[in-house]
Amino acid sequence: MKGGVMPNESSDRIITLPNLITLIRALGVPLFLFLYLKSHQPGWAFFVLWIGAITDYLDGKIARLLNQTSKLGALLDPAIDRLYIFSTLIAFMIKGVWPLWLGLILIARDVYLGFITFRLKKSGEEFIVVSYLGKAATFNLLYALPLFLLSKGSGWGLVAKEFGWAFAIWGSGLYLWSGFEYSREAIKRLHSVRG
């Protein structure tokens, strides 16, 4: 396995069904921001985030089922996950739904890992393979964030808020932990290149 992609005939292909799903999923980011910040329609914004979370799960399953894993998909999928998390956190911080300090810590984690990834690529190293821990962290955050859009008032809104915070606390912890693990792996590789 090289660069997180199983070797197969389609590993260098660009046009695949999973990649198409991933690109369509990317269009949900500006749509979410428009619906939530500009049109003030949290119900539709929730729907967009929910579809984004489901298709994040589906594109990987379909890729393995149809033997259409690709290097492009292995790069695009986590990048779009970061984009969803990044943009949703910023929108929530603007609206006061998410604590500013926690949002900034999670965003700083991604900015730092982006810098480390750039250094790896510049040194001729492969990208770090997304770990199970990283996938679990992303899963928790992608499921937590839509719940905050339903957390108004009492009744079901209160239940959504409690579940949202449960996913968010667990997801944030895993997100930071996985960031530490990725960073440690990247630094080890960079030291081995220099040595």
Image (tube, rainbow, N blue to C red):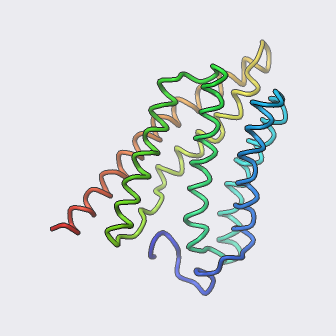
Taking the view exactly as shown, the residue that stands out farthest to the bottom is: 9
- In this rendering, position of residue 187 left or right of residue 118: left
99 above or below 47?
above
Residue 23 rendering spot, x and y as whole percentages: 71, 61
- In this rendering, position of residue 191 left or right of residue 82: left
- In this rendering, position of residue 43 left or right of residue 188: right
- In this rendering, position of residue 104 left or right of residue 181: right
Question: Which of the 4 image quarters holds residue 118?
Answer: bottom left
Q: Total marks drawn?
A: 0
Residue 2 rendering spot, x and y as whole percentages: 44, 76
Q: Please state, as top left, top right, bottom left or bottom right, where the C terminus lies in the image.
A: bottom left
Residue 66 rendering spot, x and y as whole percentages: 71, 76
Question: Which of the 4 image quarters holds residue 69?
Answer: bottom right
Residue 16 rendering spot, x and y as whole percentages: 72, 75
Residue, x 35% and y 45% (percent of image)? 180
Residue, x 49% and y 38% (percent of image)? 107
Of 104 and 18, the residue lying toward us: 104
Q: Please state, as top left, top right, bottom left or bottom right, where the N terminus lies in the image.
A: bottom left
Residue, x 56% and y 46% (percent of image)? 138
Taking the view exactly as shown, the residue that stands out farthest to the front is: 38
Taking the view exactly as shown, the residue that stands out farthest to the top is: 154
Of 161 and 95, the residue lying toward us: 95
